């Protein structure tokens, strides 16, 4: 059986391991620490640093394919590995679009994909000019390295923007800016693609962020017209194909209203790996994003993306400000006493405020009831009490 | 988080590990070999022999509960461990009913559960007397150690029976006999029970054996009246409760026709662990038998046993007489090319004729179409060709 080497030791690698086990495969994990989320649950762990080429060499030895649970491996290392004959999926030419927001937006604009107006920001003057061009509706972003709301700023005045840009450029941060979108909600379109070119898309979901972090996902996205569902799935498949993505691609989207009050879609970010907004597939779909990612990078035919329930809701378990004294096992028992159908997924991570330590999936037939149950369960798992009514 | 120590290194322990990972838990595996099915995929493996009390001590060190993927740990060791304060689930007093077929049948008869006429066979005379009592319809069984059709004999004549019994008793095999049942089909009723006494049953399934080995399971059992579904589920729950089973219990059943031609049920065997006829729950149920087993032995509230599809069929992947040259990865790709929805589960085991090396689950809405797809997929995975039509 083929060996997949995963670079990264977080919950995404951990959940790839559960999928790998059932496929009869062996996952190699390049982990920074023995007690990291993925290293805890894998038999074949290489300890090392993903920015070190020697460690990457050790991780790939005897493996059939290298893939990732994050986008932070240096591009030059990936090019070197490919030159040495290593099978890297997704490859660096696709991956750069998930690493550099400016590169991605330029590429998507070339493809005719809907993106907000944007500009490279290489000087305070660039920033001021863009501020005027979009009537002060500026979202400033670090081109690389941001995630979960980090590396994104919304300065209110031209002066604030100028000062911020001056400081960030001084510190060596590459920047871009885009027009702030008056979003009505966020959506996510996920798709998988194989090196042979097969693509398969899951239903588009609605995602809800809190403090820049994904807090919930509702699948399929409620009140999204069948037409927009289809066109958005098609858009994700086209992006995957045009960018040469392999494995799972998440296209994070903004839904806005056009001048006629009709729903309109803009691409926000890309991620080339399993994604938080796809966790619902573990319990709500025939094929989970983790199995699909493995199938895709191994160039197997992709699995069915049919849903198993009318609605599936995922609620993230995000560390509370204060660790409740109650042991986690007791909290799980309380959740299951109230909701025997709650699918609890935990990452083997210690408590820290705001940290993603798990998620709860719930399948059902009624959106509101299912959402309430999933979110209440996720809430209890960190607060050891039920949320206030309403 | 609690640590579960599993005694046994086969596919059942392997699939408990996938469930454990998602629950954020750590599975300790007592394995006979590093490359065994479960040891391949677990980070915390103790190598040792489950008949050796010292090895059992090493396996349980620092763990919260001990459970099993087979029933072969010596009863005296279990009693000793309990006396030392170890939390053993299921305990030896329940487990003996899955270890000794005579003890089980006596106990079930006491409970009023339907069992065929049976007798202890401690001499050739016992056997001859029983032969006459059941008009020659004799099924002879080893009281302990049999599985997958091993340890079961159907002698045709009184002379054959007498000779067989003489030889087996001489060899030290404890025996019992029961009346051979004119079965119309086999069913399986699975249930989980916690130490606190909660029970939850899955729908009763039909299982099909080939050469004494489970080859397929169809859930729920087709053409089983709602009344018989309910009463059989109730029977399994009552057996679990009366015998003090904890974890998952499989009640293997014979369906026959009574004198009026109406369906009638007899208990055949008990297994106190996840069971081959429950593999379908991994893809067809809200809660799989592996998650439920962990929840049960840890005394968590049990999960929903609602189905996710109208029908789920499991086909076992049983080693063919000849290993086809095609690599397994290529076989998987071929299966998925035809059936993108096939859920392939492999156990990391090498090929051997008749050996259980995996299974395929398929969900659907039509029994025959779903069964055909599941069985064809399982067949291809060992033969590298599709079964002949019809």
Image (tube, coloured by chain):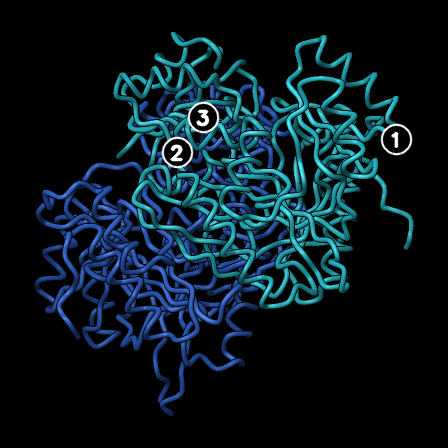
Chain colours: A blue, B cyan
A64 to the left or right of A317: right
- Does residue B234 sit above or below B133 in this rendering? below
**Residue at x 87% of width, y 22% of height:** B160
Can see residue A217? yes
Q: Disc 1 is attached to a residue of which chain?
A: B
The quadrant the C terminus of chain B occupies is: bottom right
- Of tags 3 and 2, which is closer to the observer? 3
Q: Is the residue marked by circle 2 packed among few (<14), some (14-19), or many (20+) residues within 10 Å?
A: many
In this rendered view, identify the residue nearer to me: A98 or B323. Answer: B323
A255 to the left or right of A250: left
Helix, strand or loop at mark 3 = loop
Residue under numbered circle 1? B156
Q: Is the residue marked by circle 1 packed among few (<14), some (14-19), or many (20+) residues within 10 Å?
A: few
> Which picture quadrant has residue B82?
top left
Q: Are marks 1 and 3 in contact (CB under 8 Å)?
A: no
Discs 3 and 2 carry the same chain letter: no
Spatial CA distance of label 1 from label 3 is 47 Å
- Does residue A267 sit above or below B297 in this rendering? below
- Residue B50 image point, x, y percent: 48, 15
Residue under numbered circle 3? B42
The quadrant the N terminus of chain B occupies is: top left
**Residue at x 46% of width, y 63% of height:** A189
Spatial CA distance of label 2 from label 1 is 63 Å
- Residue B376 image point, x, y percent: 79, 48
Helix, strand or loop at mark 1 = loop
- Residue A106 image point, x, y percent: 43, 59
- Residue B36 image point, x, y percent: 56, 20
Residue under numbered circle 2? A8
In this rendered view, identify the residue nearer to me: B59 or B351. Answer: B59
B206 to the left or right of B248: right
Q: Disc 3 is attached to a residue of which chain?
A: B
**Residue at x 73% of width, y 58% of height:** B258
């Amino acid at each position: 059986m083929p060996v997949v080497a995963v670079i990264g030791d977080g919950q995404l690698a951990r959940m790839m391991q559960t999928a790998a086990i059932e496929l009869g495969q062996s996952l190699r994990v390049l982990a920074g620490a023995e007690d990291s989320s993925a290293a805890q649950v894998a038999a074949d762990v290489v300890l090392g640093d993903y920015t070190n080429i020697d460690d990457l060499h050790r991780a790939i030895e005897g493996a059939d394919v290298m893939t990732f649970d994050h986008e932070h491996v240096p591009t030059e290392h990936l090019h070197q590995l490919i030159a040495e004959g290593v099978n890297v999926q997704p490859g660096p030419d696709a991956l750069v679009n998930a690493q550099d927001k400016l590169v991605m937006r330029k590429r998507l604009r070339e493809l005719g994909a809907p993106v907000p107006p944007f500009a490279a920001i290489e000087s305070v003057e660039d920033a001021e000019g863009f501020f005027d061009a979009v009537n002060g509706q500026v979202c400033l972003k670090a081109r690389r390295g941001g995630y979960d709301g980090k590396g994104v700023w919304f300065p209110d005045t031209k002066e604030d923007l100028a000062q911020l840009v001056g400081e960030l450029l001084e510190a060596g941060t590459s920047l871009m800016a885009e027009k702030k979108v008056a979003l009505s909600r966020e959506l996510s379109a996920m798709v998988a693609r194989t090196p042979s070119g097969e693509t398969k898309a899951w239903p588009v979901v609605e995602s809800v962020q809190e403090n820049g972090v994904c807090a919930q996902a509702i699948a399929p996205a409620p009140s999204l017209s069948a037409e927009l569902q289809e066109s958005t799935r098609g858009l994700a498949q086209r992006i995957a194909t045009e960018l040469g993505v392999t494995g799972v691609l998440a296209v994070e989207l903004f839904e806005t209203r056009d001048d006629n009050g009709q729903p309109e879609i803009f691409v926000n970010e890309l991620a080339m790996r399993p994604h938080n907004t796809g966790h619902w597939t573990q319990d709500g779909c025939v094929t989970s994003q983790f199995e699909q990612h493995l199938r895709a990078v191994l160039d197997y035919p992709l699995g069915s993306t049919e849903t198993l329930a009318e609605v599936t809701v995922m609620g993230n378990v995000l560390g509370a400000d204060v660790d409740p004294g109650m042991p986690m096992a007791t909290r799980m028992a309380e959740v299951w006493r109230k909701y025997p159908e709650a699918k609890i997924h935990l990452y083997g991570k210690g408590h820290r405020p705001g940290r993603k330590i798990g998620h709860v999936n719930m399948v059902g037939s009624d959106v509101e009831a299912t959402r309430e149950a999933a979110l209440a369960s996720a809430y209890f798992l960190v607060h050891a009490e039920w949320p206030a009514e309403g």
